[in-house]
Amino acid sequence: MAGAIGLGLTSSVPGDITPGTEKQRGFVNDNVLHSSKYGDIHYSGYIPERYDGSRPYALFITLPGWEGLYFQGVGANMVEDFGVEAISYNDEMIVLSAQLNDWGETSADQVIALTEYFLAHYNIAPDKVYLHGYSGGGETGSLVMEKRPELFTAFLCCASQWDGDMTALVEAMTPVYMVVGEDDSYYGSKPLMDAYQKLHDLYLTAGLSESEIDELVILDVKEQKYFTDRGFTDQHMGGQAFAKDESIMGWLFGNR
């Protein structure tokens, strides 16, 4: 297995990755995976110094919102706390913050390519591969769930809407947690409420019981007080607070 690819932690850097040189909040920014099919995939990365490939590690990929996309500038994704906070949940986990170009099909394909690359080149526990998306990143994540949900142990969709088809997700039975403010200033709460109901009904049609469905899909709609108590007046921007909510992040990393 390769060492800490692209993060300056070892000298082992494969030819299809250009390592970043800038460090921010413990992550190395602008590592680039050069994909012949999907182009350059930019990401910030954190790999524990103790990682040597001898034992399987968890993998967490977080997809930032619009303000963290690549055209906003290298490292703009690191204004979000999800990747940084994730480190405290497992000291044997590789964390990647993808810095994509949009929140559509191409970005979803790039997320899948990045995930598959790390699964192939690192010693990753296949039952500990986690995906998160905030705002536009949540839309991208829902498209990933349409295409390759079986790659992931669980998906956390924050302050967003669901764009992807759910057929493959129901077949894979990948657990999903949807969380949003009831008056989210960008999306509102209805899109995720509708997505939850659709996914719930698909599982019901597939023959699952209510208790089984409750293990696979969670809808968490937060009132204004939740955000006010955490220093936010705007519920969409307040979605950043989910990164520091142990009940939400703990759900994600408790799945395996």
Image (cartoon, grey):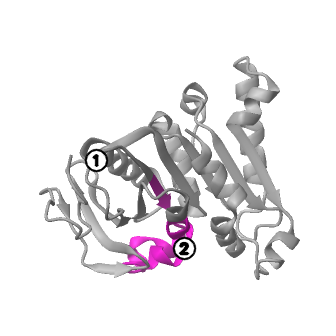
Single out the mark in the foreground, 2 or 1: 1
Question: Mark 2 is on which residue type?
Answer: Glu
The picture places residue 148, in percent across and down from the top left corner, at: 45, 37
The crowding category of the residue bearing disc 1, from other C-alpha atoms within 10 Å (few below 14, some 14 to 19, many at least 20), is: many
Q: Secondary structure at mark 2?
A: loop
- Asked if the residues shown at circle 2 and circle 1 are in contact, with their CB atoms under 8 angstroms apart, the answer is no
Q: Secondary structure at mark 1?
A: loop
Q: Which mark is residue 13?
A: none
Instruction: Determine which quarter of the picture holds residue 39.
Output: bottom left
Q: Tell me what residue is drawn at x 78 percent, y 48 percent.
A: 193
The picture places residue 169, in percent across and down from the top left corner, at: 57, 33
Q: Which mark is residue 122?
A: 1
Q: Is 198 on the left or on the right of 32, as rendered?
A: right
Instruction: Say above or below: 227 vs 191.
Output: below
Q: Is 37 on the left or on the right of 46, as rendered?
A: left
- In magenta, the rendered stretch is 60-85
- Point out the image quarter for the C terminus: top right
The picture places residue 237, in percent across and down from the top left corner, at: 68, 75
Q: Is residue 161 visible?
A: no
Q: Tell me what residue is drawn at x 81 percent, y 27 percent.
A: 210
